[in-house]
Amino acid sequence: MRPFLAVILPVWSYVQLVTASSQNTTRYEPDELRSEVSHTFLACLRNTGVQYKVYVDNGATVVIPATKREIDFDGIDRKLLECIIQVNHLMHVVAESALYDQDEHGNAAAGHSVTHEWLSTQGANGLMEVMLNQPNNLYYELFL
């Protein structure tokens, strides 16, 4: 190996490490579902104009179409996507196709009848921010 490569590689690795660690990242963990968050989501869900069913699976609030079809975020389910985005940092919500029967779909309730209490009883989770990586200011100021 040439001497200048021996110097460049460690420096390049260090720059890559500092650059990677200088990006902000957020992590979320399950938390108690707050009523104002679930009320916001459920009101939005009802205002989509589309019939959905809801069930809870391992803490996630799962929304499925009331009829056997795929989720179409570019079409009929666009407003559902907007509802999910509105609460995605506060509530664990996912959308799932209803094209194929699954055992869990039998436990799904009509979306218009779901309440915060029902979600809580079923074990729905809220989300809590637990970590925010920010640049190490000393390294960030000196090397970037």
Image (tube, grey):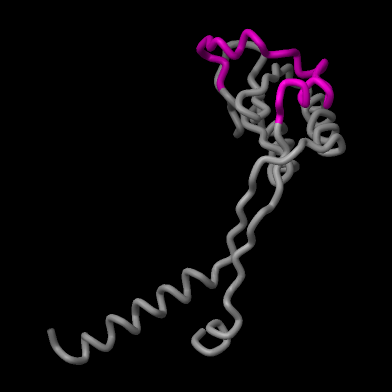
Start and end of the magenta stretch?
Answer: 97-124
| Quadrant of image for the N terminus | bottom left
- Depth check: give the residue in front, 15 or 33: 33
Magenta run includes residue 107? yes
**Image check: 127 left or right of 104?**
right
Residue 117 falls left or right of residue 77: right
Compare residues 66 and 11 and report the one nearer the observer.
11
| Magenta run includes residue 11 | no
Q: Where is residue 67 shown, x and y percent of the image?
A: 63, 11
Measured from the top left, where is residue 25 in percent x and y?
58, 60
Q: What residue lies at 43% left-to-right and 73% top-to-bottom? A: 17
Which residue is pictured at 14% across the width and 88% down the height? 2
Q: Residue furthest left?
A: 1
Residue beneath the point at 61% across and 27% down = 58
Name which quarter of the figure residue 64 lies in: top right
**Relative vertical location of residue 27 with respect to residue 93 in this rendering, above or below:** below
Rendered location of residue 56, percent (x, y):
66, 23
Q: Position of residue 101 (x, y in %)?
A: 53, 9
Picture layout, residue 16 above or below residue 77: below
Figure label count: 0
